[in-house]
């Protein structure tokens, strides 16, 4: 049975490496997203050259523009009849090349919150129909958020950090928001209908963002690929939902994520910010 897997941010780092690893699996059809069409086609060519691999579906979109995020969901729905796994990998770091000063998206939303969290929220919510239709009695569709151990509580009175801004805090806040969305999905849907997990794939892996901003590495890219691939396709994790993993192990997160009222508030604010981009 063919497994259709969509990966956002598939042109560099973890997303590209994960795509190439999954391409080696039999009966896998990949849907690859990127912002740069030329880079995306290069990765698609690499995937296609893998022995036995099915040529991937490629879709471009800038996740800093919610209209394009909505279009990305529409295009995926038009081009594939099933979607078994959605890996939300795309994101920006805490500093360069996306700036250390506060910036906003095309929709006027703080950039890291917009790209790392809100785009993930909108894309996932708009694909829920396709994901749930793809669930079978043998396996539920999966959503995987690539988050981080770097987490910071949300200031619900200043969600977009218009005051006392730092890139590190904005990044950490956006990642905690991703985890809250994972927990929310785990509560909204039964594990036989849809599962959602989030993970810290590795610390300072040798990705472009880490090399340029941090200048040193800790974990290998291969270990991050394996941790992410495991949540996406490992049969042993069938039915696992609403959980966060530090690499391969379940791990606790910031206390705020366990507060149901905070999660409800975040969802309500997210629905307001998403506006017409949200079809669900």
Image (cartoon, rainbow, N blue to C red):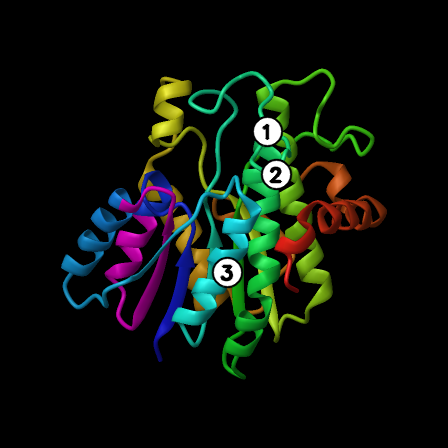
- Asked whether 66 or 8 is in front, the reply is 66
Residue that carries the numbered disc 2 in the rendered image: 107
Snapshot quadrant of residue 44: bottom left
Observer-side mark, 3 or 2, equals: 2
The boundaries of the magenta stretch are 17-37
Is label 3 in contact with label 2 (beta carbons under 8 Å)?
no
Residue 140 within the magenta-colored segment of the rendering: no
Q: Residues within 10 Å of mark 3 (few under 14, many from 20)?
A: many
Residue that carries the numbered disc 1 in the rendered image: 104
Residue that carries the numbered disc 3 in the rendered image: 73
Residue visible at 28% across and 48% down? 40
Is label 1 in contact with label 2 (beta carbons under 8 Å)?
yes
| C-alpha span from label 3 to label 2 | 18 Å
| C-alpha span from label 3 to label 1 | 22 Å
Task: Locate the N terminus by quadrant.
Answer: bottom left
- Asked whether 192 or 3 is in front, the reply is 3
Residue 36 within the magenta-colored segment of the rendering: yes
The reply to whether residue 129 is visible in this rendering is yes
Badge 3 marks a residue whose secondary structure is helix
Residue 8 disc label: none
Q: Earlier in the sequence, mark 3 or mark 2?
A: 3
């Amino acid at each position: 049975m063919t497994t259709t897997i969509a990966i956002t941010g598939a042109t560099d780092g973890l997303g590209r490496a994960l795509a190439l690893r999954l391409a080696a699996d039999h009966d896998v059809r990949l849907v690859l997203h990127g912002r740069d069409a030329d880079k995306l086609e290069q990765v698609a060519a690499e995937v296609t050259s893998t022995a036995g691999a099915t040529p991937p579906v490629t879709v471009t979109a800038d996740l800093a523009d919610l209209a394009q995020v909505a279009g990305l969901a529409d295009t995926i729905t038009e081009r594939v009849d099933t979607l078994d796994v959605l890996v939300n990998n795309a994101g920006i770091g805490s500093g360069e090349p996306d700036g250390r000063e506060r910036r906003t998206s095309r929709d006027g939303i703080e950039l890291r919150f917009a790209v790392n969290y809100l785009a993930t929220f909108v894309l996932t919510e708009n694909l829920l129909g396709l994901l749930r239709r793809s669930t079978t009695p043998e396996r539920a569709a999966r959503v995987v958020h690539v988050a981080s151990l770097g987490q910071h509580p949300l200031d619900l009175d200043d969600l977009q950090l218009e005051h006392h801004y730092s890139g590190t805090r904005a990044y950490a806040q956006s990642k905690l928001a991703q985890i809250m969305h994972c927990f929310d999905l785990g509560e909204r849907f039964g594990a036989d209908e849809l599962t959602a997990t989030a993970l810290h794939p590795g610390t300072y892996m040798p990705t472009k963002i880490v090399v340029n901003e941090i200048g040193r590495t800790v974990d290998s890219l291969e270990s991050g690929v394996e941790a992410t691939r495991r949540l996406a396709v490992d049969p042993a994790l069938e039915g696992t939902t609403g959980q966060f993993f530090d690499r391969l192990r379940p791990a606790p997160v910031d206390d705020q994520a366990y507060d149901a009222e905070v999660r409800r508030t975040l969802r309500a604010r997210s629905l307001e910010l998403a506006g017409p981009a949200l079809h669900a």
